[in-house]
Amino acid sequence: MFASATPLQLAVAAGLSLPDAYFRDLAAGYQARRDFLFDALAACGLKPNKPAGSFFILTDVSPFGAADGRAFCHELARDVGVAPVPTDTFYLNRRHGERIVRFTFCQRRETLETAARHLAQLRAMCGVDKVSSC
C-alpha cells in the first residue's frame, strides 16, 4: 500500500485552488528550460531525446568514447563541471542503460545557462568525438 505524506496531500489540495494560468505558466517554464538544455546538449555533440513529459533528457554517450555512462558522468563532472546521472541503475539488465545518461532541466534558468557554458567547453576541449581523451 502506498500513501502520500500528509503535508504533500495538503499542498496538493491547496494547489488545486490555483488558477489555470498558474499551471499554464508552470508548464511553459518547464518546456522553455527543457528546450534550452536540449539545444545545449545537441550543440556540444550529444544526440539528446526530447521528452514529452519528465524532468530529464536522456542521451546515448557512445560517440564520446567513455567506457560507459558511469565513466562519462564522472569525467564530465570532473573535467567540465556538469554532473549527469547514469541510467544503468534503473534497468533490470544494467547493460540496457549502460550507454545512456540523463540530464535534468528542473533547475533555475541561470543554473542551466551555467551548465550550457560548461558543456560548450566540452566541445572545445574534446570536439564532438571524445570526452575521455580530455
Image: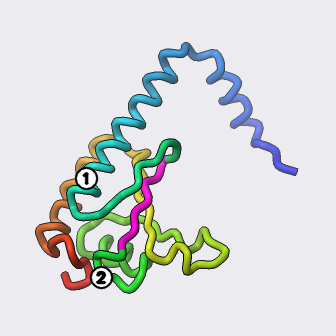
- Give me the residue at 25% from left, 52% from top: 40
Mark 1 = which residue?
A: 40
Mark 2 = which residue?
A: 65
Total numbered circles: 2
Q: Position of residue 101 (x, y in %)?
A: 43, 67
The answer, for residue 96, to whether it is visible in the render is yes
Q: Position of residue 32 (x, y in %)?
A: 34, 36
Residue 108, above or below 28: below
Residue 128, above or below 8: below
**Neighbours of disc 1 within 10 Å: few (<14), some (14-19), many (20+):** many
Rounded to the nearest whole Å, what is the CA distance between mark 1 and mark 2? 20 Å
Q: Where is residue 66 in the image (x, y as percent from the top left)?
A: 33, 82
Residue 53, above or below 97: above
- Give me the residue at 38% from left, 73% from top: 73
Q: Is the magenta stretch mostly helix, strand or loop?
A: strand
Q: Which amino acid does label 1 sit on?
A: Ala
